[in-house]
Amino acid sequence: MSQLDLARLQFASTTIYHFLFVPLTIGLSFLVALLQTAWTRRGDEAYLRLTKFFGVLLVINIAIGVVTGLVQEFQFGMAWSAYSRYVGDVFGAPLAIEGLAAFFLESTFLGLWVFGWGRLSKRVHLATIWLVALGGVLSAAFIMAANSWMQHPVGSTVTSGRARLTDIWALLTNPVFVWGYIHVLLASLLTGAVVMLAVSAWHLRRGSETQVFHKTATLSTVVLLPTALLAMMVGSHLGVIEDEYQPMKIAAAEAQWDTCQPCSFSAFQIGGGSRDETPDKILEIPHLLSVLATGTWNGQVEGLNSVNARYQQQYGPGDYVPNVFIQYWSMRVMAYLATLALLLALWGAWLLWRKKMTTAKWFLRLAVWSLPLPFLMNTAGWLLTENGRQPWIVQGLQLTKDGVSPSVSTATVAIGLSVFLALYVVLGVVDAMLMFRYARIRPAPAPSTDEHGRQQPAMTY
Amino acid sequence: MGLAIFWFVAIAALWTGFFVLEGFDFGVGMLHRLVGRTDAERRVAINTIGPLWDGNEVWLIVAGAGMFAAFPIWYATMFSGFYLALVVLLVALIVRGVSFEYRGKRAGARWRGTWSWTLTLGSLVAPLLLGVALGDLLYGVPIDASQEYTGDLLDLLTPYGLYVGVTLVLLCAVHGAVFLALKSEDAVRERAERAARRIAVVAALAVLILAVWTQVAVDGRIVAVVLQVAAVLAVIAVPWLIRDGHAGRAFAMTTVAMAATVVTIFIDLYPRVMVSSTNAAYDLTIENASSASYTLKVMTIIVAVFLPLVLLYQGWSYYVFRRRIAATDLEPQGTDRPAPPPTGLSAPPTAPAAPAGD
């Protein structure tokens, strides 16, 4: 493999790995904040026990999310120095703002929340978990603003071989950013809700603390239903926006080589490797691609060959078609699994309405097994977004192959990649082990309080 | 140019803030096995920095991201040139970060011993490598006319850079020992005080040699020498202050020493940001490595709004956790009760007394 391939593999593995933990953290911190709010307002001890129970799961994951975020932050300069030189003026700003406005907030208040039981008043302590959640939401905003600029560079010009920021406001109102950001937030909530539902279902099925876990099963279902629905609707609208700025991304997601009008959507295809222009499409649904890509019943979708020819004229000779196979399937994995999550939520909502949640054996069993869904969806979603931009690193401005570090040798990147992969595997195993362990113990009884009604301090490391 | 200079100062301040804050938690990580013989004692040591270390580490992230935004060329050349060293640094920081969280999650002696060692090594390697990197910025590494690093891993291991690394490790150690003396009780406190007194002597000597070496190697500025001498004096004062029970003042001294030592590197760098050992004409400077003025303006507004806010709430968290910690404050944790079988339908066991909000 070339240095370019290795550097891409390293970036992809770090980013995918990092994003297994981040949406869970964002979603779960919001849900835990809701639990703690319920405890603070209603005084029901069950909510306190649940807050602490899911708080442990939250903190186990935040740890990995934070430390892999360091790699994320450093790897632009390490493996992609030509890119960093070219875009630092524009791309570095949101990254630095993320650190100043979000990471400090999240880390400091996480420390205050974890160690603040019994030291802070109930209300102030409740505020700290909300600020942790806010930190996560803000950090997603700035990193998404940076990424969206790579998809659709706005608010900048290129002078003397470097991109220059001309309008920070344009970066923050980039339509790709606005809709992509909402989509990511919804995906994060969905991730947290599915995990909370799966854990609660596991306990309900074993009849352990049924009354307690019925509360989180309810909360997660109530959050999951609108979230899954909205995530799909926003995602669909995001497709329309991307089709305008990155027609290649959408055409490749349908493996649509020739321009069509109206365009049908295929449920599956056989074949369709990168250069296979005639895959067997199965179960074609008429008009659906037109609707997804343009928002109109009879919209025209430009085919890959046509876009490629146009780009060759605009940017010079070359192949501007991304890996179609990855594009086609990542889109479907994401959409199909989202549909499953929505169905699960509908089923759960119906059971709640009929007051049968705790005894619905098959629902609870399926809810436990739905645990991997959001992680697969999130990964597929990012593959769709990032692979669809290729061969560009910044759409229309810089090619990925021109972004790698000229001073870093192939062997060096190979070493870095192997070290990180080995570390990710070890940490993944440890994290999964601890998650399963702490997800399956019974929540601790509510802690004792002293004469001022405060809990004992928690020095928990 | 004016804003670029401001940003050079800001980056220097961020690195200094990072070493002052994370410096003591690096030190505590290095020393927690030494000051704590039993598991409870080690936990006391770790819990003194428990709520603080994560926020401290953000200073590094912001320093790096600030370089990316304000000096993209500096960020690109330094981070790609130091690639392998940064891989090791990241591994150290990652392993150290999860050690805090995972160590207490199970009770087995082997489990705790493993995470305790990873915490020690990570806390030692991270400041060493960061010190080498900062030393190299000043001492110079091979950089060509196109502002690219042209050396290999060995070119990074300059004697001067390595020495800066060792000095910073010693300063972190004494800073951490004094912090422990300030924040712990009983046996941990006594051992920390003893460690602080001993390490201070070595650290003072190390900074003194650094001052001389810097004069010889890079012809440092007078003001830098003054600061380095101040750092030496500050560290020398530590054993007396500790002996007389003034741990707070001793901590102020190690803070001064750490800040002065890191700041002098940037003072001697100015107006360069990364020295080329190939040719002085290829040096990266504030002028040729910075972003355009619009970006700097935006970033200046952002930093002016957010940094005071950060200092405020980070300061508040230090205030909240100001009390000393004794073994009696620790809550019982991590029984080694086996997890229930995954397929069984039996009710799961109850958690130990209080795994609590973490």
Image (cartoon, coloured by chain):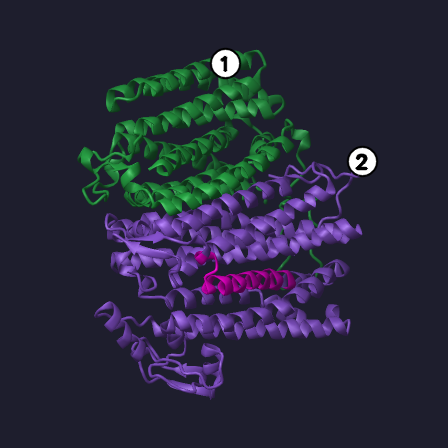
Chain colours: A purple, B green
Q: Is residue A94 above or below residue A205?
A: above
Q: Answer left or right for A25 relative to A451.
A: left
Q: Residue at x 60, y 48 (%)?
A: A132
CA separation in Å, label 1 and label 2: 41 Å
Which percent across, then down, holds residue B36? 55, 28
Q: Quadrant of residue B138?
A: top left
- Write down the residue under mark 1: B239
User: Relative to residue B61, is residue B80 drawn left or right?
Assistant: left
SS at badge 2: loop
Which stretch appears magenta? A170-197
**Amino acid at circle 1:** Pro
Question: Amino acid type of disc 2?
Answer: His
Q: Tag 1, which secondary structure? A: helix
- Checking the image for residue A452, the label placed there is 2
Q: Residue at x 45, y 64 (%)?
A: A176
Pointer 1 local density, CA inside 10 Å: few below 14, some 14–19, many at least 20? many
Q: In the image, is residue A192 part of the stretch drawn in magenta?
A: yes
